[in-house]
Amino acid sequence: MIRWTTRFALPLVASLCLATTAQAQQATERYIPLGQSPGLSSRYTYMGQIVRIDAAARTVTVGNADTTRTIALTEHTKIWLDRSATRQTTLIGRLEDLQPGQRIEIKYEDYATKDRAAWIKAAVVR
Amino acid sequence: MTSAVPLALHRFTLTRLTPIVFVLAACRPAPPPVPVPDPIAKGRAIFFNETFAGNGRTCATCHRAEDNFGLSPAFIATLPPTDPLFVAETNPDLAQNFENPRLMRALGMILENQDGFDDLANNFNMRGIPHLLALRTSVASAAGPRTGWSGDGAPGDGSLRAFATGAVIQHFTKTTNRIAGVDFRLPTNDELDALEAFQLSLGRQEDLTLPLPLKGVVPARGQELFRDNTVGKCNACHFNAGANADPAIFGAGAGNLNFNTGVEDLPDQPADLTGELMPPDDGFGTPGDGTFNTPPLVEAADTEPFFHNNSVMTIEGAVGFYDGNAFNESPAGRLIAAATGSGIELDATQIEAIAAFLRVINALENIREALALLATPNPARTAPSSANVALALEETDDAIRVLAGAGLHRDAVRELQTVERYLRQGPAGDPAPVQAAVQALERARADMIETP
């Protein structure tokens, strides 16, 4: 009788199911204002003000009362310009739209290394 | 089903005790009882009534208690034109790029922007509305929570709790600007907790343990085929007819996995035949990897249409899908062929037998749920509330429909029709017809499965 064995199971696990986190942030995330992402904000995201932007290296340095971090943007990093304070819709942004002093929230691509951003929400107040 | 009985009893005793505690408290002249916070009751109220300052929809607009917390095209056909489901037809701000009314009415399909909101006219998916039953058994996986048809439905931490926030943004908005505080308000943390508690309370709380001692020869053969890793091979992904993968194959704790089973490649899908724009649905992630999340099957037979795109109307058709090219040439189909030496090949009798098995376990679940509803007394009385009686009627009706739809267990069907007569009879709160209905439900169950 042909049976499923552990030998068969391995390629199945590897190819059929999702072993990694992938780029899976749900599209609705865009419309959630800074600091309000359910289960993420104030636990797994980093909130602070932009200290410096290095366009060539594609990094942002962000500081808050606790720490200052330099975080890299990847080709997958989403940037959202949160204009809910002025009752306008959230726009998709680029690195060039960010400015020192701006309040931002960052979700890390990997919480363990905290070095790359999966998404950045930047507060636009005017 | 044996494991479900103590669960129902447990719920029964718990809820039975509540009024006694109240009575005892009332006898004493001491301070009135401190209200115990009940997140499930709070979540239920939010689920049915809260519009989140949006377009008028609630969660229950699409997840109807009377339709297994889902919504079928048949049910949609009974709704008045003023129902908030149809906001795209009644609210000019939502006329464009929010829903496709034709596909909604014909096939129960809802527009979702899983891959982003940057090109609303072209970048969307049309998906069916899933039931919300047995969520306690069908979300956890080794790779994190899996919600929605592609497993990536929730924003934030991706949890069932966070799902509601995404649902408000997608479905409740007053305009496609989707501005928090203007077009809707986001659920608070307390509301998310309560909604999660309520949703987790719905339906089955644990997986079955197959094989069940089924009495009908065809459903019993269907169960064998379902579990046979050389024939049906269903149990590998739908372990114990649930939503989790077989731990012997995929590893302990693998949980609720995603697969690309090729549903998108089905030819002649009803939605495509309408000629309406149906962009391909690429499943999990952005860009997607083509995989979809495994749904539980105990709840399947009475929640047609099937699959993420509502492409198949009958449970026989859904089982037959696995005999076809779309499945056998899919990534999942090919790997199954590689792992077991052959694809899935089922003849008409076997398709019907597996479907009969799925019909019977669905009817048994309907009966379990109806008994649980009838065992939950109205706080003031000894009989269940009229709302519970109405839901027990729906469950009974579903059981009749799935059994009679394939000529199964005619004696059980007769008993279930008796249940309906009893439940429609008598003033609300009269325990006698309810007791008679409970006995008839138990007889119907005994017709289908050996009971200890």
Image (spheres, rainbow, N blue to C red):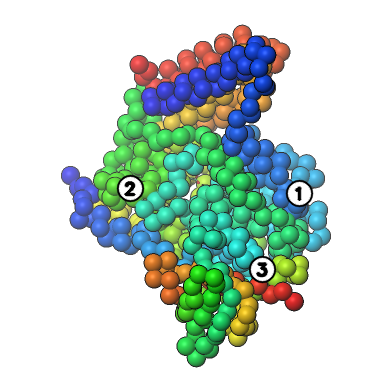
Under circle 2, the secondary element is loop
Please state if B305 lies on the left or on the right of A9 as rendered. right
Amino acid at dot 1 = Gly
Q: Earlier in the sequence, mark 1 or mark 2?
A: 1
Location of mark 2 (residue)? B253
Location of mark 1 (residue)? B56
* Residue B439 seen by the camera: yes
Q: Bin the neighbour count of mark 1 within 10 Å (Cα to Cα): few under 14, some 14-19, many 20 and up.
A: some
Instruction: Using the rendered image, report if marks 3 and 1 lie on a common chain.
Output: yes
Location of mark 3 (residue)? B120
The foreground one among B11 and B445 is B11
> Which mark is nearer the camera, 3 or 1?
1
Residue most toward the top? B432
Please state if B289 lies on the left or on the right of B380 as rendered. left
Q: Quadrant of the C terminus of chain A?
A: bottom right
In the rendered image, the vertical position of residue B8 relative to residue A87, given as above or below = above
Amino acid at dot 3 = Leu
The foreground one among B360 and B194 is B194
Q: Earlier in the sequence, mark 3 or mark 1?
A: 1
Residue drawn at x 69%, y 49% is B105
Q: CA distance from mark 2 to mark 3?
A: 38 Å
Please state if B38 lies on the left or on the right of B246 as rendered. right
Under circle 3, the secondary element is loop
Chain of residue at mark 2: B
Residue drawn at x 63%, y 62% is A32
Q: Residue B75, percent across and down?
A: 66, 39
Q: Residue B413, percent across and down?
A: 52, 21
Q: Residue B64, percent across and down?
A: 64, 39
In the rendered image, the vertical position of residue B387 relative to residue A50, given as above or below = above
